[in-house]
Image (cartoon, coloured by chain):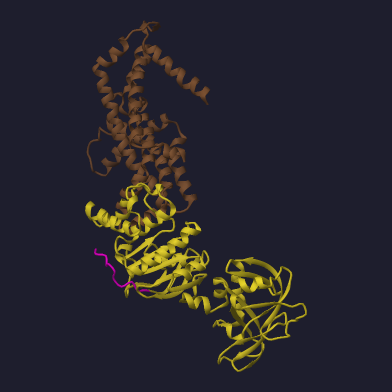
């Protein structure tokens, strides 16, 4: 049995469903990941992201559908035959074996001689700067060091796909930031496919070429990290990724590619609808980045006085260093947040309880589309509330 | 705790050691300090055969209980899904312990006997013509009895250490290309070491200290260290019995010390 080394790591998940007894973890899901890309599966716990990873790894088999790696179906094959390697959430280092034995384990299973596997293991330990710890036991290493060893162990067979299950969740904040840069560097260097499961939005956006946002066993949006952040497809994605305010209202009229929308509080905004022509009375959703909102104190403004503005009471203020996060109470259920540049904020600081008008440019609004339509938006809202 | 140990462990042992140096006459103990009892133990040819016999039983029984115990524990830990079923099967393992040792030993007689279940079944099936003699009142029967009695003492500690093994270790090994037997050999076995050591101590000390199973199952044809000791006690020769008891205690202590040297059992007992 010869493992393909550095073969084509293109992954195709085709109409895969996975059921555990009576719960459906993954529902008829399809996903393509190009060879050599860094892909993050992102979602809250229980959304099925780890199940997908394990089905690609060969530790779980799909109830129906097909998984292909490099164009070939791998359902039923062992991990070794797939040319994949997995890095486990708790690292799963063998506690009774030294670092170098851990790293060389896969070669031992392939019948490599001790010299051969120790040589290769040393080479990989060098790559992750752990060669000094070769003879230690895993329990004698810190979390970050264990992670490096686990990475070296996963890479020793020259896999074409590396699968990482929440690789950074056991580390503290400082190490997490460092290691995610490290992972990205290693991936670029090797040019193989990385699939990284995480529930942390910023982590996904920081490392991945492609981010797949999942909820309840299906894909909500799969796009580049930048697109996910600047052009979320649905209200769910916009809310989950954060950094966006989701606006909603009922169409009053459409003119020149802009729909005038009025919300329950009477605030009015123009949503860019392009060529679409939503009917009067239809509900629309749009997202706007929190750093595209301008706040001014105003005690007399009433909702509806201007377009693309809403009035609210300042609810919370958090200084984030380079910007200030101002949370408004708009009396709608949705949280509404503005990120003000620190210079602008401190020229004339707003206080909690102040009455302010939030204004934005209609061009910065991003219409949230969803084929399922208005009614199922309501259902999506419920999902968010459940989280 | 310390008081309990003093009253029920240290004082009795000291008494036995003291008595082992006493003299005896016509069934009564005479206070003295003589080495004769130990000289008798070490010069008697019977001692060697008894120890050889007991050690042979201990070795065979250890190997068999380890083989069975490891497999039962492995099955319970890694193949039985659901804690309830696991506990249920565990209780099933303890069912034989709901009756006394004596009844359990005696119940082998109709199974292994000359006209017992196995012999009559084999004869009816035409596999043999005359009953197999070695089934009962033989070393074979003694081993059957021991294995029956002591396998659970191997299962429990091994189960305990196996249950602590993180499942993702097995997956990591599989991911690295290890087959099922390789996983057992490379991961499960080394990580069950403390359980195996504890089980070994239980089984070996019990076999070394037994006379009843040997007596019943061998029909008096085989002897163990303790069965000789028992005969001395029955003849009211307490000082020589005490001397052999002290020797046996020393031997078993050395064996346990040897096991503890190889495996650090504290790791499991502590956590």
Q: Is residue A129 left or right of residue A212?
A: left
Chain represented in brown: B
Answer above or below: position of B202 versus A104.
above
Seen from the viewer's position, the closer of residues B243 and A204 is A204
Q: Quadrant of residue B258?
A: top left
Residue depicted at 41% across the width and 47% down the height: A139
Q: Quadrant of residue A381?
A: bottom right
Chain represented in yellow: A
Q: Position of residue B2 (x, y in %)?
A: 51, 24
- Residue B63 shows up from this direction: yes
Residue depicted at 41% across the width and 43% down the height: B161
Give the quadrant of the C terminus of chain A: bottom right
Seen from the viewer's position, the closer of residues A300 and A252 is A300
Numbered range of the magenta stretch = A1-11
Q: Position of residue A79 (x, y in %)?
A: 33, 63
- Residue A47 shows up from this direction: no
- Does A5 lie within the magenta span? yes
Q: Is residue B34 left or right of residue A367?
A: left
């Amino acid at each position: 049995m010869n493992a393909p080394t550095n073969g084509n790591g293109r992954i195709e998940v085709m109409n895969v469903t996975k059921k555990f007894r009576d719960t459906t973890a993954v529902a008829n899901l399809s996903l393509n990941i190009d060879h050599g890309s860094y892909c993050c599966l992102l979602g809250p716990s229980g959304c099925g992201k780890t199940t997908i990873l394990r089905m690609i790894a060969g530790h779980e088999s799909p109830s129906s559908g097909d998984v292909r790696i490099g164009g070939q179906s791998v359902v039923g094959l062992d991990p070794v035959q797939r040319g994949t390697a997995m890095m486990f959430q708790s690292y799963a280092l063998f506690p009774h074996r030294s670092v170098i034995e851990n790293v060389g384990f896969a070669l031992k299973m392939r019948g490599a001689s001790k010299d051969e596997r120790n040589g290769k293991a040393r080479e990989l330990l060098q790559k992750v700067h752990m060669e000094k710890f070769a003879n230690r036991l895993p329990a004698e290493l810190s979390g970050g060091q264990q992670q490096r060893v686990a990475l070296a162990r996963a890479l020793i067979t020259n896999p074409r796909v590396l699968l990482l299950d929440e690789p950074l969740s056991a580390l503290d904040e400082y190490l997490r930031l460092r290691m995610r840069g490290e992972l990205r560097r290693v991936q670029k260097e090797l040019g193989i496919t990385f699939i990284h499961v995480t529930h942390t939005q910023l982590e996904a956006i920081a490392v991945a070429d492609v981010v797949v946002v999942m909820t309840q066993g299906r894909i909500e949006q799969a796009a580049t990290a930048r697109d996910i952040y600047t052009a979320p497809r649905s209200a769910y994605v916009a809310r989950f990724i954060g950094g966006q305010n989701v606006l909603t209202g009922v169409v009053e009229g459409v003119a020149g590619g802009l729909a005038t929308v009025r919300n329950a509080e009477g605030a009015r905004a123009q949503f860019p609808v392009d060529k679409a022509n939503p009917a009067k009375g239809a509900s629309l959703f749009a997202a706007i980045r929190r750093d595209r909102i301008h706040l001014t104190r105003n005690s007399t403004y009433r909702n509806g006085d201007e377009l693309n503005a809403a009035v609210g009471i300042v609810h919370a203020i958090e200084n984030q260093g380079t910007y200030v996060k101002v949370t408004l109470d708009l009396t709608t259920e949705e949280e509404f947040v503005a990120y003000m540049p620190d210079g602008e904020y401190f020229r004339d600081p707003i206080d909690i309880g102040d009455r302010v008008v939030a204004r934005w440019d209609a061009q910065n609004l991003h219409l949230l589309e969803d084929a399922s339509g208005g009614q199922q938006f309501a259902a999506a809202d419920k999902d968010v509330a459940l989280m | 705790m310390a008081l309990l140990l003093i009253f029920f462990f240290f004082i009795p042992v000291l008494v036995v050691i003291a008595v082992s140096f006493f003299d005896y006459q016509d069934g009564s103990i005479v206070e003295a300090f003589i080495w004769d009892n130990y000289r008798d133990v070490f010069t008697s040819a019977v001692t060697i055969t008894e120890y050889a016999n007991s050690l042979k039983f201990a070795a065979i029984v250890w190997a068999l209980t380890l083989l069975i115990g490891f497999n039962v524990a492995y099955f319970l830990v890694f193949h039985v899904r659901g804690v309830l079923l696991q506990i249920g099967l565990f209780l099933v393992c303890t069912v034989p312990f709901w009756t006394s040792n004596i009844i359990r030993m005696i119940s082998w007689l109709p199974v292994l006997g000359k006209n017992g279940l196995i012999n009559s079944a084999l004869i009816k099936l035409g596999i043999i013509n005359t009953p197999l003699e070695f089934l009962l009142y033989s070393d074979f029967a003694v081993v059957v009895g021991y294995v029956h009695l002591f396998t659970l003492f191997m299962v429990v500690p091994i189960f305990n250490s196996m249950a602590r093994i993180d499942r993702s270790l097995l997956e990591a090994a599989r991911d690295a290309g290890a087959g099922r037997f390789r996983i057992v050999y490379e991961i499960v076995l080394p990580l069950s070491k403390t359980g195996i050591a504890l089980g070994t101590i239980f089984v070996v000390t019990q076999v070394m200290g037994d006379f009843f199973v040997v007596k019943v199952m061998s029909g008096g044809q085989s002897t163990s260290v303790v069965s000789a000791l028992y005969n001395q006690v029955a003849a009211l020769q307490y000082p020589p019995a005490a001397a052999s008891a002290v020797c046996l205690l020393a031997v078993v202590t050395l064996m346990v010390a040897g096991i503890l040297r190889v495996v650090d059992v504290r790791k499991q007992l502590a956590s």
